[in-house]
Image (cartoon, grey):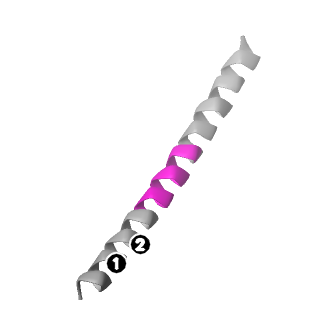
């Protein structure tokens, strides 16, 4: 069962890392689109 717990910990850690990367890329895309629309309106 120890290996199972270790595997679950690695899985959850990887999931958290993936979520962080996705959030960061999404926010970057949103900022880029926002600035692009602002320059277009000006």
At horizontal 32% and vertical 72% (from top left) the residue drawn is 34
Instruction: Check the image and name the residue furthest to the top.
Output: 1
Left or right of residue 15: residue 35: left
Instruction: Tell me if residue 36 comes above or below residue 26 in the rendering.
Output: below
At horizontal 37% and vertical 70% (from top left) the residue drawn is 33
Instruction: Check the image and name the residue furthest to the right.
Output: 3
At horizontal 45% and vertical 53% (from top left) the residue drawn is 23
Left or right of residue 4: residue 26: left
Q: Is residue 38 shown in magenta?
A: no
Instruction: Tell me if residue 37 comes above or below residue 20 in the rendering.
Output: below
Residue 30: x percent and y percent? 38, 64
Q: What quarter of the picture does the C terminus occupy?
A: bottom left
Query: Could you tell me what secondary structure mostly forms the magenta stretch?
Result: helix
Mark identifier at residue 32: 2
In contact (CB < 8 Å): disc 2 and disc 1: yes
Instruction: Check the image and name the residue furthest to the bottom.
Output: 42
SS for tag 1? Answer: helix
Of residues 17 and 25, the one nearer the viewer is: 25
The quarter holding residue 13 reads top right
Residue 3: x percent and y percent? 76, 18
At horizontal 51% and vertical 51% (from top left) the residue drawn is 22
Q: How crowded is mark 2: few (under 14 residues within 10 Å), some or many (20 or more)?
A: few
Q: Residues within 10 Å of mark 1 (few under 14, many from 20)?
A: few
The quarter holding residue 14 reads top right
Residue 15: x percent and y percent? 57, 37
SS for tag 2? Answer: helix
Span colored in magenta: 18-27
Instruction: Tell me if residue 38 comes above or below residue 1 in the rendering.
Output: below
Which residue corresponds to mark 1?
Answer: 35
Residue 37: x percent and y percent? 30, 76
Of residues 12 and 37, the one nearer the viewer is: 37
């Amino acid at each position: 069962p120890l290996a199972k717990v270790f595997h679950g910990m690695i899985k959850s850690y990887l999931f958290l890392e993936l979520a962080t990367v996705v959030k960061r890329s999404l926010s970057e895309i949103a900022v880029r689109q926002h600035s692009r629309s602002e320059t277009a309106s000006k």
